[in-house]
Image (cartoon, rainbow, N blue to C red):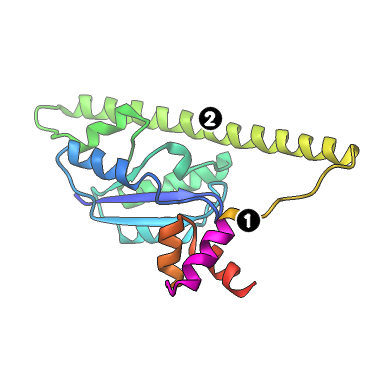
Amino acid sequence: MFIRAYLRASTDSQDASRAKGALVQFAADNGHKIAAFYTENESGTKLHRPELFRLLDDSHDGDVLLIEQVDRLSRLSPDDWASLKAIIAAKKVTVVSLDLATSHAALKPAQGQDDFTKGMINAVNGMLLDMLAVVARKDYEDRRRRQAEGIENAKARDVYKGRQVDQALHNRIKECLDAGKSIRKTAEIVGCAVSTVQRVKTA
């Protein structure tokens, strides 16, 4: 069994690797090491994410897809979530999430469990995974709705200025680049995506 950790953030300005330490510690507490990390800045509402699908391509029967929270894996529509689940099932990969306690059993020895018990654990885990995926999607839709309402209200009052640049982040990036740091090293130091550093460099 190989454990492959998936780390995702929605925007370039967010640190997708933020939860890496928590995942490493969780695996160690359960007697395992993480074989590989797959990190990207992509929306959880998108089904086709390069690093997620690279993880699945690399995976084999019995491997574990480890995440911090279910919303790191999915804020998908019901149809896209069903598609992703089918792909995961076809690869015979088990999803383990820190926020889903029933999934942790996948990292424990299965000796002494009969087929009925294993089946029940898998069924309960699948049901709860579906529920958390639905909650994650609803949270995303609610936030988008509130954001749209806020923008409309701001426009009506003629105070809407659009998305503001994170000037402090840009300044830190420029300082690292001016000090001779590479684009990738700068991204690691300031905790942002490589693409953000590239945009600041070429601006």
Whether 56 is among the magenta residues is no
Answer whether labels 1 and 2 touch (C-beta < 8 Å). Answer: no
The three-letter amino acid code for the residue at tag 2 is Val
Q: How many marks?
A: 2
Question: In the image shown, does 54 or 175 lie closer to the viewer?
Answer: 175
**Type of residue at label 1?**
Gln
Within 10 Å of the Cα at label 1, are there few (<14), some (14-19), or many (20+) other Cα atoms? few
Q: Which residue is mark 2?
A: 135
Q: CA distance from mark 1 to mark 2?
A: 33 Å
Looking at the image, tell me whether mark 1 or mark 2 is earlier in sequence order: 2
On whether residue 173 falls in the magenta region, the answer is: yes
Q: Is residue 90 above or below residue 71?
A: below
Q: Residue at x 38, y 39 (%)?
A: 68
What number is the disc on residue 158? none
- The residue under label 1 is 167
Q: Which residues are magenta?
A: 169-181
Which residue is more in the foreground, 37 or 153?
153
Image-quadrant location for residue 201: bottom right
